Image (cartoon, rainbow, N blue to C red):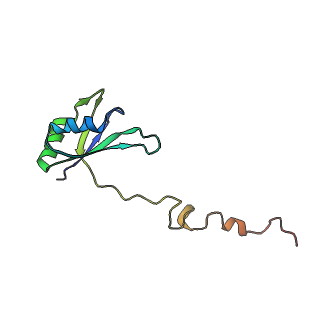
Amino acid sequence: MDTKLYVGNLSYSTTEDDLRSLFGQAGTVVSVSLIKDRDTGRSKGFAFVEMGSQSEAEQAIKQLNGTRVGEREIKVNIARPPEERSYSRFDARGGGRGGSGGGNRDRNRRGGGSRRY
């Protein structure tokens, strides 16, 4: 079992210090990472908390999952490893629809333009 926990359904006003003191009741808190919107700096409503040991992480889940923090009932469980992201249409593998790398380039090579001879 891992020691990193996912904490969801947080109030947007919850701070890292709030989480540190809350999870400190269950054991040693190694780190707290409150996830924020990169443009606004506002909390996204979830965080990751790393506990000192597996038993402390298990205790935190038992003790805090489903409890009310402010006006919300929080969710606490083991954090899953990040999923491999699928590439967007603007990635380095060729971009454009279908990954052909063509984009609009092929559209400009068709005849019928306004060329004069």
Q: Please identify the quadrant where the C terminus is shown.
A: bottom right
Q: Which residue lies at the image location 37% right of the left edge and 59% below the top edge?
A: 84
Q: Closest to the observer: 86 or 37?
A: 37
Q: Closest to the observer: 111 or 79?
A: 79
Q: Closest to the observer: 48 or 28?
A: 28
Image quarter of residue 7: top left
Q: Which residue lies at the image location 38% right of the left edge and 38% below the top edge?
A: 43
Looking at the image, residue 24 sits to the left or right of residue 81; the answer is left
Q: Which residue lies at the image location 21% right of the left edge and 36% below the top edge?
A: 21
Name of the residue lying farthest toward the bottom:
117
Q: Closest to the observer: 32 or 80?
A: 32
Q: Position of residue 113 (x, y in %)?
A: 80, 65
Q: Position of residue 86 (x, y in %)?
A: 43, 59
Name of the residue lying farthest toward the top:
71
Image quarter of residue 112: bottom right
Name of the residue lying farthest toward the front:
17
Q: Position of residue 76 (x, y in %)?
A: 24, 40
Question: Vertical placement of 37 versus 71: above or below?
Answer: below
Q: Which residue lies at the image location 57% right of the left edge and 68% below the top edge?
A: 101
Q: Position of residue 75 (x, y in %)?
A: 26, 38
Question: Vertical placement of 94 versus 5: above or below?
Answer: below
